[in-house]
Image (cartoon, rainbow, N blue to C red):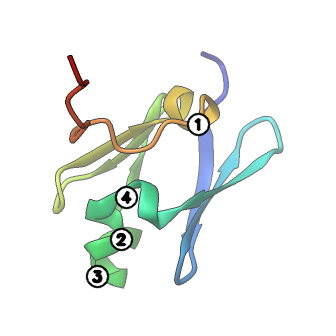
């Protein structure tokens, strides 16, 4: 994927990701419980990489591909009914 994150900011309810193609994504913090529960200091301590975002202190990794696809936290998915 050639689209990457350039900048990141937060408000009380949203993570804002500025992309290399000029778009800005607004993602609800409710999609990512570890970010929602993190302190403001932990939220801004993000490593922006070519393919995504990484927060060492809260063990969170978010791909740009996943954000563009509209995916939230994939670590705790409910089991499918049989």
- Which is nearer the N-term, disc 4 or disc 3? 3
Tell me: residue 33, above or below residue 11. Answer: above
Instruction: Return the residue nearer the eye: 11 or 49.
Output: 11
**Marks 2,4: beta carbons within 8 A:** no
Q: Which residue is mark 3?
A: 39
10 Å crowding of disc 2: few (<14), some (14-19), many (20+): some
- Which is nearer the N-term, disc 4 or disc 1? 4
Residue drawn at the location 60% of the way across and 28% of the way down? 69
Q: Which residue is mark 2?
A: 36
Q: Which residue is mark 4?
A: 46
Q: Would you say 65 lies left or right of 55 here?
A: right
Mark 3: secondary structure:
loop
Residue drawn at the location 83% of the way across and 44% of the way down? 22
Q: Quadrant of the N terminus?
A: top right
Instruction: Return the residue nearer the eye: 49 or 64.
Output: 64
Using the image, tell me which numbered label, if any, was put on residue 70.
Answer: 1
């Amino acid at each position: 994927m050639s689209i990457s994150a350039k900048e990141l900011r937060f408000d009380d309810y949203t993570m804002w990701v500025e992309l290399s193609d000029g778009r800005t994504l607004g993602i609800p913090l409710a999609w990512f419980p570890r970010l929602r529960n993190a302190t403001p200091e932990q939220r801004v301590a993000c490593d922006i990489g070519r393919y995504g975002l990484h927060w060492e202190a809260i063990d969170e990794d978010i791909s740009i591909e996943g954000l563009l696809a509209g995916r939230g936290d994939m670590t705790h998915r409910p089991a499918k009914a049989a």
